[in-house]
Amino acid sequence: MRATSITRIPGIVQGLRHSYNRGVTRPEAWRREQLLRLRKLLQDRGADFERALFDDLGKSGTESQLTEIGFLISEIDHALAHLSKWMRPRRVSVPLAVLPASARIIPEPLGVVLVIAPWNYPLMLALSPLIGALAAGNAAVVKPSELAPATSALIGRTLADALDPRAVAVIEGAVPETTALLEERFDHIFYTGSGRVGRIIARAAAEHLTPITLELGGKSPAYVDDTVPLAETARRIAWGKFINAGQTCVAPDYVLGTAKVLRELAPLLEDAIRDLYGTATDRNPDYGRIVDDAQFSRLVGYLDDGVVVAGGRHDSASRFIEPTLLTGVGRDSSVMREEIFGPILPLIEVQDLGDAIGFVAERDKPLAAYVFSDDGDTRRRWERETSSGALSFGVPVLQLVAPELPFGGVGASGMGAYHGERSFLVFSHEKPVLSKPLVPDTLAATIMPPYTAAKDTL
Ligand code: NAD
């Protein structure tokens, strides 16, 4: 694994701050140029990024284009199309008592920001926050995940050169390097990863009173009832679950349904897996691999928590785990206490809708909840009685490709949101600017002492 020398870190951050303070990153033209250069890098080096993602996660080229490279290019295009509007000051009204006066909100950059990325979509989750940071006019440090070393190295080798090295730096490394980085003062820290490390980030940020965004995970449920076509439902759940071999923060973690629904759904899920990946999943280039041995052993351990009704084959040498369905799983077993983050899908039996909602509502708030029901009352109850980062009816995962929808968690699944304009706002301070003429001086007669009875009524 490549790592940046820890002794260089303070100087790198200082250099970025110097550039920021000199106003390098503020002009709209600079922001646009960086976004265009990032777009060009992704296009020109697309094949190299695909290869790195294959080396790290066995990702197919098409999947890398769809979920990482192409996704980033769309985000850049959206930012470029809207940047002028996002940057424009917004006029707002003031109360009568304050008139004559005018008020505006001016978005200003925060300064030098830090983006810490995880390994599961190692390119997309490192660069998607960066798009917002650059659009908003910040200098930025990107810290890719050491668990996706090929992608980290390629980002390290290409990013700062492709962009303006005065204002963008990549720090590679693991815990020691990240710990050293967190000692520096940043103006925002944007972290994607586990809640365990999220707490470490929050503690470090508190030292400098640095605002943070935490994009965490959780157990996202998929609830299925008998009002929807089950074959199509099974296909969508299987797609959302097994893409990237289940290592997706918004993947359906488990399925909730009555005994009757699950009895019908299980064979349809098997059919869907076969349709998507064939029978020899281990030889299918569209199906990914588990990122490392520690994750592999953790996942294989879950297979003992229930009855494997489909899949279950695994190979430690290639870190392959077949798409797997588990039934007979205890509600308090470890596979139901921890986020699975791999290709194992427990089917959990519930008595009825109330039992399913109660099951979700009494656990940590998930990053997403997926409801497959055409019944209006059922949908409304999920909207009102459960809380999750996002709620989707009829399809998993896709909520994150709509740039107008804020993407983020709530409670244990995170704080803050991004994508589209939210990415710009996360890295901006919305500065209120009030402007009042000194003449006529209405304040003496309204809010200044001496206080008279007439002023009580204002
Ligand atoms: P992780 O927390 O182990 O690692 C993420 C980053 O934190 C890496 O860059 C790593 O170097 C750094 N890090 C690790 N230990 C650290 C420490 N002690 N001090 C400082 N930094 C440290 O997370 P992960 O295992 O890479 O990612 C998996 C988790 O991320 C899952 O829970 C998943 O749901 C979540 N996730 C969330 C989203 C989202 O958008 N909400 C996206 C992807 C993954």
Image: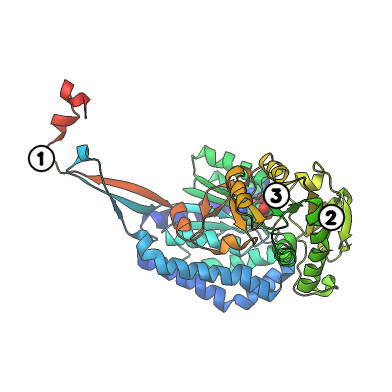
Task: Count the marks.
Answer: 3
In the drawing, does residue 140 fall left or right of residue 102?
Answer: right
Q: Mark on residue 219?
A: 3
- How far is disc 3 from disc 2 in space, using C-alphas? 16 Å
* Residue 117 in view, yes or no: no
In the image, 239 versus 30, the foreground residue is 239
SS under mark 3: loop
Q: Quadrant of residue 138?
A: bottom left
In primary-sequence order, the first of circles 3 and 2 is 3
The reply to whether callout 1 and callout 2 are in contact (CB within 8 Å) is no
Q: Which residue is mark 2?
A: 326
Indicate the position of residue 341 as horizontal and vertical percent values: 73, 55
Residue type marked 1: Pro
Q: Is residue 450 left or right of residue 395?
A: left
The residue at 84%/66% (across/down) is 318
Name the residue carrying label 1. Answer: 440
